Amino acid sequence: MQVGDQLVRAGEAVAIWNSSVNRDETVFSDPDRFDLGRTPNRHLTFGIGPHFCLGAPLAKVELKVLLEVLAEKVTRMELAGPVERLRSNFMWGIERLPVTLR
């Protein structure tokens, strides 16, 4: 089977890096930029099909409320320390992101 420019032969091991799925540079022009208005954005954070996350609707509401409140009350965010990234091939994320809200 051909995957992109890579030939995968029968019996060869293949690893899936879920953490890269929403940051594919062949799909998004600036894949690492946080962009709430990114379109098209077939986001796969919560899975797909029978593997879709049961808690996704609640998580989406929580994020929407958080972002609305931040937009109302915060005019500026400043980095207040080092960013610690989550080290995982299963999911991409930030373990620690200290910020000052103004």
Image: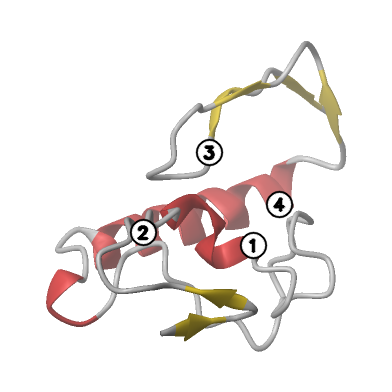
Q: Which residue is mark 4?
A: 72
Task: Identify which amino acid the numbered label 4 is placed on.
Answer: Glu
Give the image location of residue 98, x and y in percent.
68, 17
Front residue of 15/41: it is 15
Inter-mark Cα distance, 3 to 4: 25 Å
Give the image location of residue 14, x and y in percent.
36, 59
The extreme bottom residue here reads 40
Task: Identify which amino acid the numbered label 2 is placed on.
Answer: Val
Instruction: Please rate how many residues cluster around mark 2, counting C-alpha atoms within 10 Å: few if below 14, some from 14 to 19, many from 20.
Output: few
Is 62 displayed left or right of 65 in the figure?
A: left
Q: Which residue is mark 2?
A: 14
Inter-mark Cα distance, 1 to 4: 28 Å
Quadrant including the C terminus: top right
Q: Which residue is mark 3?
A: 93
Is 40 displayed left or right of 54 in the figure?
A: right
Give the image location of residue 27, x and y in percent.
69, 80
Choose the circle earlier in sequence order: 3 or 4.
4
Task: Identify which amino acid the numbered label 3 is placed on.
Answer: Gly
Choose the circle earlier in sequence order: 2 or 3.
2
Point 77% across, 40% down: residue:
74
Front residue of 38/18: it is 18
Indicate the secondary structure of the residue bearing disc 4: helix
Choose the circle earlier in sequence order: 1 or 4.
1
Choose the circle earlier in sequence order: 2 or 4.
2
Point 71% across, 51% down: residue:
72
Task: Please tell me whether mark 1 or mark 3 is closer to you in this view.
Answer: 1
